[in-house]
Amino acid sequence: MDIPFPNKKYQVIYADPPWNVKAGSKQGRCKEDNQKSLKLPYQTMEVEDIKKLPVKDISAKNSVLFLWTINKYLEHSYDVARSWGFKPSTVLIWTKTPKGIGLGGTFTLASEYLLFCRKGSVRAKQRVKGNHWHFARGKHSAKPSFFRELIKNTFGDLPRIELFAREKAEGWDVWGDEVSNCID
């Protein structure tokens, strides 16, 4: 990505990397139907390139990371978090209402994962009951706004940024190639 990284420190980093995957077929059918996977409407990145992003440079000494991942990259997401200077802690789960047959092989996929990680010590303002929530699917790769609110309500009004953002959210700095970057 050729977008300049911010020159600011954040205590909350919320990231949805463009993992290198395909979008599936138009009808959302299985590979057995001999349909080619479509390209995603955005640029993807290899794991090694994601790991090299200078997230260490923008994370405060005491900060938290919320890193979106999918089944295929769950194991790699732990390596990404560590390379960014964070210690993985808990996997939060978004279960989705299936849409057609969907992606996947033997088991079709209807969940995404939000890896919660820590660097130093940031105290939560509240304890959250549970680690999984069900929301309907939106546009491809769009995440429910619930998760931004959950993060804000859990950690308070700390300096925060959303990496690989698609839209501006109130109170968040944003960075990505699908949104006008806004670093306050």
Image: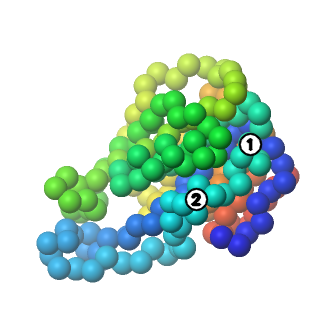
* Residue drawn at the location 20% of the way across and 59% of the way down: 105
Q: Give the image location of residue 28, x and y in percent.
A: 26, 69
**Badge 1, how many Cα within 10 Å: few under 14, some, many 20+?**
many
Q: Name which residue type carries label 2.
A: Ile
Question: Up-down: is 51 above or below 119?
Answer: below
Residue 97 seen in render: yes
Horizontal arrangement in the rendering, residue 7 relative to residue 13 (left or right): right
Q: CA distance from mark 1 to mark 2?
A: 15 Å
Looking at the image, residue 33 lies above or below residue 86: below
Crowdedness of circle 2 by 10 Å Cα count: few (<14), some, many (20+)?
many
x then y, percent, for residue 55? 69, 50
Helix, strand or loop under label 2: helix
Image coordinates for residue 101, horizontal then vertical, percent = 21, 62
41 over 7 or under it: above or below: below
Which callout, 1 or 2, points at the residue further toward the start of the chain?
A: 2
Q: Which mark is residue 50?
A: 2
| Location of residue 31 (image quadrant) | bottom left
Marks 1/2 in contact by CB < 8 Å: the verdict is: no
Q: Is residue 131 left or right of residue 63?
A: left
Residue drawn 41% across and 46% down?
A: 75
Which residue is more in the foreground, 109 or 142? Answer: 109
Q: At which x and y percent is residue 118?
A: 62, 32
Q: Residue at x 76, y 60 (%)?
A: 5
Q: Is residue 82 above or below residue 87?
A: below
